[in-house]
Image: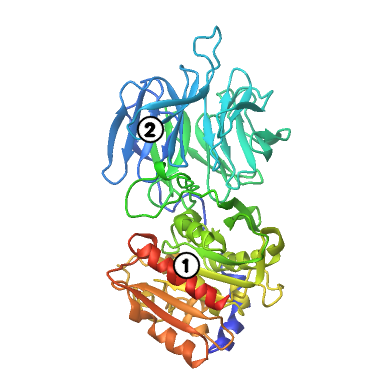
Amino acid sequence: MSQSTPILSISLSLLLSIPSLAGPLIESGAELELISADFTLADGPSWNGSTLYIPDVKGEKLYQYNPKTEKLTVVLPEAGRISASFYNNGRLYLSENTKSRISWLDSENNIEAIAGQDPDAKNPARPNDLVADDQGGIYYTLTRQGQVIYINPEGQQTVAANGISGPNGLILSPDQQTLYVSSTGTKKIWSFYLVAPGKTKPGIHFASMDSGPDKGPDGMCIDRAGNVYCAGAKHVWIWSPSGELLEKIETPERPINCAFGDSDMRSLYITGFSGLHRIRMNAYGVAQNPAPIDSLQKKGPRPTTEIPGTLDSHLNVVYGQDGDRKLLCDIFRPKGTSEKLPAILIVHGGGWLNGSKNKFRALALELASRGFVTVAVEYRLGHEAKFPAGIQDCNAATAFVKANAIRFGIDPKRIGAIGGSAGGHLVGLMATGWENSGTQRNVGLEPNASRLDVAIVMGGPMQITTGSVAERSRDPKSGSNSNVWLAATIDENPELYALADAHIQIDKNDPPIYFLEGEHDNPEGNRLSIDALKNHGVATGLYVYKDGQHGCWNLHPWFNDMVDDMVTIFEKNL
């Protein structure tokens, strides 16, 4: 490995000194910001990818807040008493308390009932809070009845949990295996393991929220790490997945509910008696599942995220764990074949600080439809955990795919990867740094456990110690992402940057690496790596797409042509 000796010699000592976590959950210097007090009582908010919905349960209105324009507008002036909202699967789900039903908001801003009790009954059951899973199922609480009800995707209702004293807020864990329910009557949070959608094991006492004689827990949300957030009498309380109290955020008056939002999903919005507030976090909210049917997808140049009936999908599969932090992936496989298929790991971009495994859903579906098992990988982003956590996660995903090849019908000797932007860099580093113990979480793994058989880099920098990344690192005005991700500038920690540099780790043992670039991105930026790969006898190549810019791989008209080339590369090398 060119320059491998100094890199390998520093990697183990670096692991002892690199902080894996980014620091406290609340961003340094962040304060609770009042967005608006123009509510009678702001309740369960939800983020749809660009704006925040906020029901005013007592004012009987539905509001929408746009953080880019900082404007708060009324979506429905006569909405009735909506006690909660939840956005997922391309839909805004609503809990209509006084109408005793669960509904959703259609594209024309009309409320369409999907299930519920008879509002004309003598004692109608009034839903309180709700959450929608990635399969289209909905859970909601009936506070007076002490129940959690589940609505399956076909609209059938069953009791998911019973005998809870005053169930109020509820939320699903990121892997959707645990349902958390707040019990106002006992001031406790309960966790219910889901043996199947809508079917729970007996509840387990997860945490207590005791603020003296004041009222108990209310609405809830969760972050990508699985930390549980719950509004209480005076604070929003935050617990780790194992139930350790991590933080309490004080609010001016009683908080009612909370949700993550903004483009990077790092703003915690809090609703309550004092209106709508926001505070910046080092944690990330859980990204919404993309629209599973084309009619719910926003029209535009992005390819469809509809899951075709020809594919089997396994969403939110746990591929690894670091402490109580579970790491997830989505797996798609063609139906109707028992043949062992090659697998493609798909690594999203976002400057190492943003993005989610859902970002490349369309690409994962299209490649799976072309005869591959695709694995869209989540990895820890820079405000949650510092390098090398992210690359360790990606390498762990490769090892997981090989170890679980029989389970998912995969040929473990045919494993490829593709990534775009920061994901492209990570795939490049997976391909060239696979021998480096500093980028592996478990250094006791069999050496080839995370080795790829072919890699495709799209718009990702192979060079970190030189080139544009290094230049921005040295510029105090650049807002360098690498300085956040690596918790240092290149001059402060050149050895750490070397560990993250895919280019200088190229050697003859690396798998084939190909580069796909938009014409107006930076195709020639790959020239040094292409020359180095050729010098070591490693197959490589550059594909350039006319008029394409950064991110063109996720847009029409480039998407189909780029997928055709990806398939050609993978079939040739797998």
Q: In the rendered structure, are the residues bearing label 2 and label 1 in contact, judged by CB atoms less than 8 Å apart?
A: no
Quarter of the image with the N terminus is bottom right
Which of label 2 and label 1 is nearer to you?
2
- Colouring rule applied to residues: rainbow
Residue 570 appears anywhere in the view: yes
From the image, tell me which residue sits under label 1.
419
From the image, tell me which residue sits under label 2.
106
Q: Is residue 44 above or below residue 541?
A: above
Residue depicted at 41% across the width and 23% down the height: 57
Dot 1 falls on a residue whose secondary structure is: strand
Q: Could you tell which of marks 2 and 1 lies nearer the N-terminus?
A: 2
Q: Is residue 324 above or below residue 215?
A: below
What amino acid is found at the position of numbered circle 2 in the picture?
A: Asp
Residue nearer the viewer, 318 or 504: 318
Q: Position of residue 410 (x, y in %)?
A: 65, 65
Residue ranking furthest to the front: 336
What amino acid is found at the position of numbered circle 1 in the picture?
A: Gly
